[in-house]
Image (tube, grey):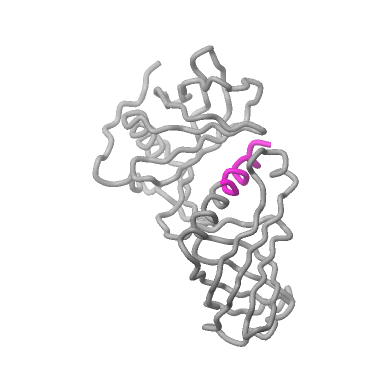
């Protein structure tokens, strides 16, 4: 197999190539469909021996390696427990800068030692941002105290730094800068999550927060509140663990 042999950059992440570089998408992601840029990133992954995770419906692999690639296919070391009976796949990895990437592809063939995947038409990466947000399952709620009044809102999305609330009224929260206390975030297990061991909801005691944004959507008749957390580091670590699991669950939907 003739592999691409491009020199990897040791000083900075891959940048735009031929006007087809990274395009900003929703949810904190960037997307590229440039074969040259994708090839450059894959070459770096081969040279730096970064671990890959293979995700299929009902399956998530242990770490494996990209051994090489051509313009048509990727050559990946076969995980010991690889089921070999699925085609749709998501491959996830972090580059040498710690930036998470993923792409969708199909299994072309496999041997006892190797799995051959289709060369990806698109690749996605998370932007360099301090607080990555994920959408939460329906029924996720936040309760807290505001001026000794108990409030309860639905939660649309969350990061380790804050969350977006929505409800039919502002429940007495009159302006930005209002302080919220005893914040508790409750996330239910979605139907799909219940089928995956470890991918469950949870309850997170956030502590305090501040209202940073307050808007009303007239067409939907909904009130939105953007909240910034001021909880401790332990809570943030627990929340980040959940956010990472939730992100994997969202990616897994793409192979169903």
Can you give x and y, in whole percent of width and height, for residue 169 in the image?
A: 72, 80
Q: Residue 241, percent across and down?
A: 53, 50
Up-down: is 192 above or below 159? above
* 249 inside magenta stretch: yes
Magenta segment boundaries in residue numbering = 245-256
Apparent side of residue 189 relative to residue 23 in the rendered image (left or right): right
Q: Residue furthest toward the top?
A: 112
Q: Residue at x 54, y 48 (%)?
A: 244
Looking at the image, residue 72 lies above or below residue 254: above
Whether residue 34 is in magenta: the answer is no
Find residue 140 and report its horizontal and vertical position in percent. Answer: 69, 61
Magenta span: predominant SS is helix
In the picture, the quarter occupied by the C terminus is top right
Q: Residue at x 64, y 78 (%)?
A: 145
Asked if residue 51 lies left or right of residue 178, the reply is left
Residue at horizontal 35 percent and vertical 31 percent from the top: 43
Residue 155, above or below 108: below
Q: Position of residue 147 (x, y in %)?
A: 62, 85
């Amino acid at each position: 197999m003739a592999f691409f042999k491009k020199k990897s950059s040791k000083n900075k992440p891959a940048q735009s190539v031929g006007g087809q570089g990274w395009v900003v998408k929703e949810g904190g992601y960037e997307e590229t469909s440039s074969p040259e840029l994708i090839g450059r990133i894959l070459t770096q992954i081969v040279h730096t021996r970064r671990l890959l995770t293979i995700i299929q419906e009902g399956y998530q692999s242990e770490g494996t390696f990209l051994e090489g690639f051509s313009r048509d296919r990727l050559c990946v070391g076969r995980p010991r427990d690889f089921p070999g009976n699925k085609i749709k796949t998501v491959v996830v990895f972090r580059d040498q800068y710690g930036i998470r990437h993923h792409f969708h592809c199909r299994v072309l063939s496999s041997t006892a030692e190797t799995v051959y995947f289709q060369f990806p038409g698109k690749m996605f990466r998370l932007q360099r941002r301090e607080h990555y947000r994920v959408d939460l399952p329906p029924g996720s709620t936040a309760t807290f105290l505001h001026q000794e009044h108990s409030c309860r809102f639905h939660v649309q999305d969350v990061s380790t730094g804050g969350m977006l609330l929505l409800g039919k009224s502002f429940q007495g929260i009159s302006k930005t800068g209002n302080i919220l206390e005893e914040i508790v975030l409750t996330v239910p297990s979605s139907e799909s999550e219940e089928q995956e061991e470890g991918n469950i909801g949870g309850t997170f005691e956030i502590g305090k927060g501040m209202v940073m944004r307050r808007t009303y959507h007239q067409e939907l008749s909904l009130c939105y509140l953007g909240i910034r957390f001021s909880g401790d580091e332990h809570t943030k670590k627990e929340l980040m663990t959940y956010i990472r699991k939730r992100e994997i669950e969202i990616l897994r939907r793409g192979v169903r």
